[in-house]
Image (spheres, grey):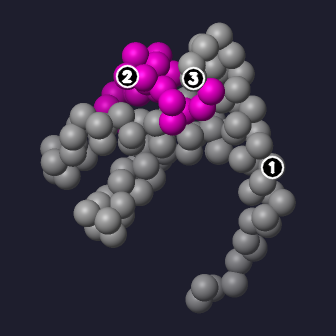
Amino acid sequence: MLRPHAAESSADIRDRVLKARQIQHERFATKRKVRCNAQMSSKDIKTFVPLDPESEGLLRMALSELNLSARAYDRILKVSRTIADLAGAEKVDSTHLSEAIQYRTLDRQVWG
């Protein structure tokens, strides 16, 4: 708000969301009960959200420092997969994971 910068238009955001939904549709085409990242089981998360060592360390630290539950762990990974999809990234990396952790932290502060 303090510095002028080009904001992403609503149309551009809509296009990114539609592309992300298409990616998820294709990802889960063979899964009967899963249509989007939010519906992934723990087994699906292991398959579709593999983490590199740096990301694993980041998540391990966040779980410890923030005292997060197993449910929160799964939710962070689902959200990070969605963030990666919105970015058009094939794999989840530490930037996607960091953003998801920030959302979880904010969620706890606001609602918790």
For the record, the magenta segment spans 35-57
Image quarter of residue 50: top left
Q: CA distance from mark 2 to mark 1?
A: 29 Å
Q: Residues within 10 Å of mark 3 (few under 14, many from 20)?
A: some
Mark 2 or 1, closer to the camera? 2
Left or right of 33 in this view: 12: right
Q: CA distance from mark 2 to mark 3?
A: 12 Å
Secondary structure of the residue carrying numbered label 1:
helix
Q: Residue at x 48, y 43 (%)?
A: 79
* Residue type (three-letter) at the residue carrying disc 3: Val
Residue at the farthest right position: 11
Judge by depth and name the residue closer to the eye, 102 or 56.
Answer: 102
Q: Position of residue 64 (x, y in %)?
A: 16, 44
Q: Position of residue 17 (x, y in %)?
A: 72, 47
Residue on which disc 2 sits: 42
Closer to the chain start, of discs 2 and 1, is: 1
| Rendered position, 91 above or below 13 | above
Residue at the farthest bottom position: 2
Q: Quadrant of the N terminus?
A: bottom right
Dominant secondary structure of the residues highlighted in magenta in the image: helix
Image quarter of residue 20: top right
Residue at the farthest top position: 30
Residue on which disc 1 sits: 15
